[in-house]
Every structure is written in structure tokens, then in C-alpha cells.
Image: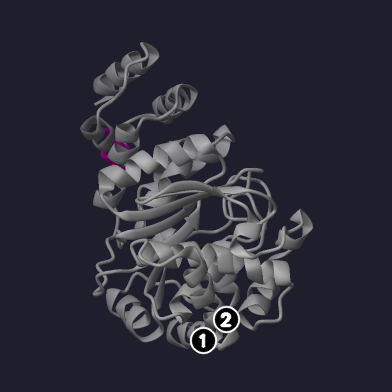
Amino acid sequence: MEQTMKGYLFRLLNHEELSREEMKTILIGITHSEYPNEQITALLTCLQMRGVTVDELLGFRDGILETGVSAVLNADRYIDVVGTGGDRKNTFNISTTACFVIAGAGYKVAKHGNYAATSVSGASNVIQHHGIKFTDDIDKLNRSLNEAGIVYLHAQLFAKAMKFVGPIRKALQFPTIFNLLGPIVNPSQPKCQLLGVANLDQMRLYNNVYQKLGIDYGIVNSIDGYDEISLTGDFKVTTNNYERIFRPQDLGFEIAKPEELVGGATEEEAAQIFDSVLENRALPAQKNIVLANAAFGIQVLEKGQKSIKECIEIARESIDSGSALRTFKKFVELNS
């Protein structure tokens, strides 16, 4: 097998692109320990320097889903809300909080997440902080989805390939193709996705990826570099139906200050902000940011048939009526 990897590396050094099928073969080879670490390191570096193509990314996705544990959920339409991370802004758990607001509004959510990469508290940190036990037991997962409207899929239990490259990624210290894979390897393969990206290059890449996958999607980016709608300034949204730049005022929101989004210095502080939003006692800016992100998720679920203003009101009702909090309590009860 080493010979083929040598061939792939020569082609990459020659500025050629690899096919979706070739990338899938490489990923499966990595999980069978067929290549020395030095070659995997070279591959990741070459791809990063040139910039990964849509087919290369999809090939690695195919390999990760094939070698991983699948999560076949018995619901047709559910959403995942996730950010690519790496914006180094250390915001509170906006996507995760928004997921419970969406579920509280009566929609289904399959949240895929992991421990923090660059912030103090990732989705798995805040979920685990509340006593949740992660599982890949499909009956438990389906029960949570059907009874609480939301299920949490802890990435490490499903994407078996990731542990083979963990040490290499740690040693390299720069982002690799694996950083781009997180948002597209949800083992339940949702037909709806709201994705926050940290820059417009990523927005273009995922726009092409989601079109190829044929799912309903919304991709958001705050122009000042947040990988979610931060309300600190203008933000861009690309969906199946439109591409446009919004101002916070367009949605009836005040402009937020960066310090109002900070997730705190500890996991404990991040969890307190998460709780305060669901309990409807957060700073107005924190609540508004969650409402904005939840609303664009709801609009994706509604296939763009509802205006964003309507979707904000649906999200607001979920928090104000206590429904989002009840959903979270039910989720904790089923998953502890």
C-alpha cells in the first residue's frame, strides 16, 4: 500500500487533485494502519497548502462514515446546528443552546458535537457538565429524539477514524482537512443543517458540498470573523434559496458587544450562560444571539417557507413559554 501513497503524494506535489474515490480509499487505509505517520503528515500538509477540493473533502467524509458507527434515527426531518470552530473567539455554546430552543419549538434535532478544540467549552463539555452519559445505543438515541425532540451524538463514539489521526493533528498544530470534516460527518446524516463558518472561503466550500449532498442547509458567517451569527455586526447567510447580508437591525436586534458573547474562563461559567438562556434570565444580547441562530435553523427546517421574522418569533416563544427549558430537562432525564 505504501507505493500507492507515494503515488498520491507525488501527484499532490505536482498540484494535481485526488478523486472522491481515491480519498475514501486513503481514509480507509489510514484506519487499517497501512501508512506510516510521516506519509499521513505529508498528505495533510500538501492538502492544506493547496486548499482542499469539494470531492477530496467528500471522499474523506465517505470513508469516515463507512468506517464509523452509524446512527439510523427513526425520524425523517431533523437538523444539526454546528460551527466549524477555530474562530478563536471563545464564545459561549451558542449552537448547542440554539438546538434546545429549536427542539422546544417542536422540531427534531440531532446535534453532533465534541469536546472543545479552541474554546473553553465545546458542545460535549456543556452537555456532559449536566450529567449526560454519551451513548451510541440506537434505542436510547431514538427514545431521546422521540420523547425530548433532541438527541446528542458525541463524535468520538461514532467516527472511529479520528483516533488514528489524533496524535498527528495534535503534533501539527495547524488546521487540517479533519477540521473541515466535523460538520459533515454527523452519523445520522441529517437532511437539514445550519452551519456557522469562520470565513467566506469556507462558506463557498460548504455551499458546494451541501449542494452535492442534496440537503437543505443554511450557512452563516459574521463578517467580523465569528463562526455563528454574533450580532456584533453584519452577517452573511447562504441557503438553498438565497444569499444575503443581514444587519442585526434588520431582525429587530441591537448590535451586541463582543464581551457579551464570551463563554467564560471555565466550563462551569460556560454552563451557567447556557442555563441562563434556557431559563430566560440571560443578558438580552445572549438571548438575542441564540434566537437569531435558532431562527435560521428553523427556516432551514421549514424549507425557507417562513420569513426569518416569523422564525425569530417561533424561537422566542420556545424560550418565553419555558418550552426550551422543559425540553432540556426531559433530555437530561432521558440521558443521565
Q: Residue at x 30, y 20 (%)?
A: 8
Give the percent coordinates (x, y) of residue 117.
58, 50
Q: Residue furthest left?
A: 21
Kindly identify which residue carries mark 2: 319
Extreme residue in the top direction = 14
Q: Is residue 171 left or right of residue 177?
A: right
Mark 2: which amino acid? Ile
- The reply to whether callout 1 and callout 2 are in contact (CB within 8 Å) is yes
Evaluate whether residue 125 shows in this view. no
**Magenta-span inclusion, residue 149:** no
Q: Where on the picture, by quarter, is residue 334? A: bottom left
* The N terminus sits in image quarter: top left
The secondary structure that dominates the magenta segment is helix
Which residue corresponds to the image point at 49% horizontal and 47% vertical from the top-left? 244
What amino acid is labelled 1 in the image?
A: Ser
The residue indicated by pointer 1 is 323
Residue 143 image position (x, y, % from top left)? 32, 83
